[in-house]
Image (spheres, coloured by chain):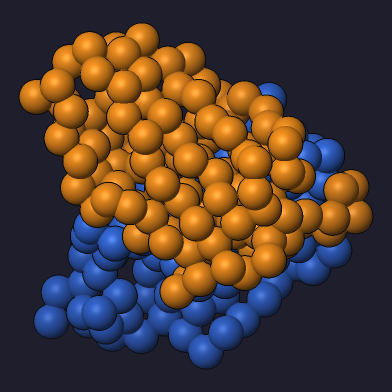
Chain colours: A blue, B orange
Amino acid sequence: GENVEQHPSTLSVQEGDSAVIKCTYSDSASNYFPWYKQELGKRPQLIIDIRSNVGEKKDQRIAVTLNKTAKHFSLHITETQPEDSAVYFCAASELRDSTLTFGKGTMLLVSP
Amino acid sequence: DGGITQSPKYLFRKEGQNVTLSCEQNLNHDAMYWYRQDPGQGLRLIYYSQIVNDFQKGDIAEGYSVSREKKESFPLTVTSAQKNPTAFYLCASSSFYREVYTDTQYFGPGTRLTVL
């Protein structure tokens, strides 16, 4: 089955800095890669996703890049703000059953 | 997100008891999923259902059971066979287009189960 590795497990940045979280996947059949943000005690919420026919996608301060050859994808957050502090999860899915395999998460702390 | 509800928010169980967690959605989604979340472990898939009256085991199905009698409902039973059931349980739903398109999964607010 699919295996998703996520790094780093924790990330501390100063407000205004950029943050990058990286994930690798094992199954070359995976073609959908969402990123979720989860605040303490709350439900995960989708912040951005990318499909295998696209190499990069941006939404304001958030961007995701995908390298299918190397089987890795990354989340980039620019101009970080304290409200960006949360746990971020990457995931991978293939068309066969549309289930998601999640990474173990990255706790992002943005200090004022 | 507001279209997926889970109840109760907190649940306490004594060892040896079965408990059922509720998940309801009004998004007209075909597919529903149950995940378990432990600190530092991410989300792990317990069971999923892509159509009424059908469901499949996920990665950690042992000690759990589900039913899908209605499109909008997918209850999860945590049985006494589950050795370490204390966790945060999340339900999700999505549209389903087999081998055509993977749709976004939307999550419910979760149920925190504690075994006393």
Q: Is residue B7 visible?
A: yes
Q: Is residue A5 visible?
A: no
Lateral position of residue A24 relative to residue B81, left or right: right
Lateral position of residue A26 relative to residue B91, left or right: right
Q: Which residue is rendered at x = 17% and y = 15% of the image? A: B15
Question: Furthest-front residue in view?
Answer: B69
Q: Does A83 sit above or below residue A95?
A: below
Q: Position of residue A17 (x, y in %)?
A: 31, 78
Q: Position of residue B17 (x, y in %)?
A: 24, 18
Which quadrant, please, contains the N terminus of chain A? top right
Q: How many marks?
A: 0
Q: Does A105 sit above or below residue A4?
A: below
Q: Position of residue B107 (x, y in %)?
A: 47, 59
Which quadrant, please, contains the C terminus of chain A? bottom left
- The quadrant holding residue A20 is bottom left
Q: Does A84 sit above or below residue B83?
A: below
Q: Does A91 sit above or below residue A86?
A: above
Query: Closest to the observer: B31 or A33?
Result: B31
